[in-house]
Image: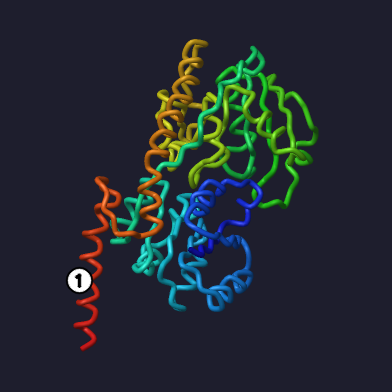
Amino acid sequence: MKICFVGHTFHARTRSSAFIQDVLGTLGEVTVLTSSPDGDASADDPIVERFLAERFDLWVFWQTEYVAARLIPLGLMNAVVAPMYDGAWARPDAFWKQFINQRFLTFSRTLHTKLQNLQQRSASFEYWPKPEAVPDRDETALRSAFFWERRPTEVPNLASVSQQCAALELKTLFIHAVPDNGREVGAQRLGAATHTMRSGLTVTTSTWFDDAADFRATMKTPLFHFAPRALEGIGMMMLEAMACGQIVLAVDRPTANEYIGHLASGLLYDTDRPLDLPGLSASQREALSRAAHLRVTRGYERWMADQERLLSFLLDDGRRWPNTDCSAHFGLTIQRKARARRVASTRK
């Protein structure tokens, strides 16, 4: 089976889509192409040319639904479109309705529900990473937090997170200062590699590490982890943080509020009231850390148990599952055929 995977250029470095590429690799030969929604539309012309020149048994568009839309008039048929909530939530209904002959793979229940309401064929899954051993954290780590400042002009950013650290009585904040747009070097913007803010919070900054293992070790050492953006697709860093027992603070919006329960497996907050945080005793912090790790442990077990359904969906083998996400497809097929008949009758 020949599969063409069209992924997000940014993920080529972060490898956040590696898990789904591994799944596809069990089905056949995978060709990986990349695209950026921030680039000029003509930059995707080679993908269009590849579509016209070479036959693939399956196309998968990972957060690149805009590329799939270009191929629909050219005869795109057997395709799985995997939009992410952070890039898809604002798209108008008309955009999604053009994908009537494709199927959607979603990792956000909110987005999944929207697509099904638009009579699209969508299957919803929850991805969870493999849980890790919780490191022994000394007193410094228990009073520390990690934050990747990806969008300095939006909440969460250094200003909001540093205030939240003060509210939580944290002493150290590690900032990975690499913004998404790449137009400024975060460490230079902050002015120094390490400095102490007025609140007494010690802030240490970095840019890209030479060794990814060093970055992971630095990220996972503090007890607290601030999700980098208000909206997420899956939120890979957030899940990896929970996997090693970190307490994640995230904005109360998808997909964070679909994976995290407030005061059950993490902390959720409103961007308009970022300092409205509960006081946490040492025992409560320990309990939240354990709960986050347990949430990932159970989630990973469900993710692995759901692999057969995922493969069935990717192959479109016609199997029905005792799950509303997939069983609804039968009703949607009937609706599509009825709509086709109505359209045909109006053209006579």
Any part of residue 152 in sight: yes
Residue 164 lies, in percent from the top left, at 57, 26
Q: Decide: few, some or many residues near mark 1? Use Cα within 10 Å; few <14, some 14-19, many ≥20.
A: few
Any part of residue 35 in sight: no
Tell which of 26 and 293 is nearer to you.
Answer: 26
Q: Secondary structure at mark 1?
A: helix
Tell which of 72 and 57 is nearer to you.
Answer: 57
Residue 315 lies, in percent from the top left, at 39, 59
Residue 100, image quadrant:
bottom left
Look at the picture and state if 205 lies above or below 150. above
User: On the rendered structure, is 276 left or right of 143?
Assistant: left
Residue type marked 1:
Ala
User: On the rendered structure, is 247 left or right of 187?
Assistant: left
Tell which of 71 and 33 is nearer to you.
Answer: 33
Quadrant in which the C terminus appears = bottom left
Q: Residue at x 46, y 27 (%)?
A: 266
Q: Residue at x 67, y 29 (%)?
A: 217
Residue under pointer 1: 338
Residue 182 lies, in percent from the top left, at 70, 51
Q: Residue furthest bottom?
A: 348
Look at the picture and state if 175 lies above or below 49. above
User: On the rendered structure, is 139 left or right of 248?
Assistant: right
Look at the picture and state if 226 lies above or below 169. below
Q: Residue at x 50, y 15 (%)?
A: 286
Q: Residue at x 65, y 13 (%)?
A: 138
Residue 341, image quadrant:
bottom left
